[in-house]
Amino acid sequence: MFSFQKNSLLLARRLDMIAALAIFTMMALTCVDVFLRYFFRKPITGTYEIVALLGAVAVSFAMAHTLAEKGHVAVSLIVQLFPKRLQGIIESIISIFGIMLFALIAWQSVLYGVDCQRSGEVSMTLELPFYPIIYGVALCAGIVCLVLMVDLANAIVKVKDK
């Protein structure tokens, strides 16, 4: 189990690095676009589209790492007052529902990506295809499922400990 946990965290970290690169690119592109627009009256064509697509990359690729590092908002004040075994049961249920949700997101994203790829759907200005971003969302949702499986295993251990 330790190897599975280690590999899923490593994968989540790598995806988070891609998310950080996307955020940096968004910032740099926006700054250059504003500079060129203000001083030379020549904006970069398609900046809005690129920033929107990079935003989708940043959010989806950061999900698994955020979950692995417990960086998300969690309301656990009351749960912390319960015995460890009951905490483990509640965490197990939450992990199971999370796995179901993100598996559904991954599955539907793949279906949507295939549909966009077959139809040739592209962005309006630069005509960039949408399907690679959608497949990226599907991949990241799948990685979130792996991280949630690690959380589920840890919660089950908490239930079994006396």
Image (spheres, rainbow, N blue to C red):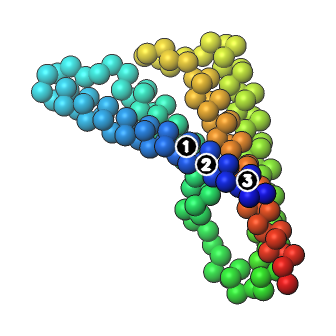
Would you call the spot at circle 2 few (<14 residues within 10 Å), some (14-19), or many (20 or more)? few
The residue sitting at 24% across, 30% down in the picture is 32
- State whether residue 76 appears in this view: yes
Q: Residue at x 71, y 80 (%)?
A: 79
Q: What's under tag 1, amino acid-wise?
A: Arg
- Label placed on residue 14: 1
- 92 vs 48, left or right, is right
Horizontal side, residue 63 vs residue 32: left or right? right
Front label number (3 vs 1):
3
Residue drawn at x 48%, y 14% as measured from the top left: 127
- Identify the amino acid type marked 3: Ser
Picture coordinates of residue 132 (x, y %)?
60, 24
| Disc 3 packing (10 Å; few <14; some 14–19; many ≥20) | few
Q: Position of residue 151 (x, y in %)?
A: 73, 61
Q: Earlier in the sequence, mark 2 or mark 3?
A: 3
Q: Which residue is mark 3?
A: 3
Q: Position of residue 160 (x, y in %)?
A: 87, 75
Query: Nearest the camera: 158 or 42?
Result: 158
Q: Nearer the viewer, residue 127 or 138?
A: 138
State the residue position of label 2: 10
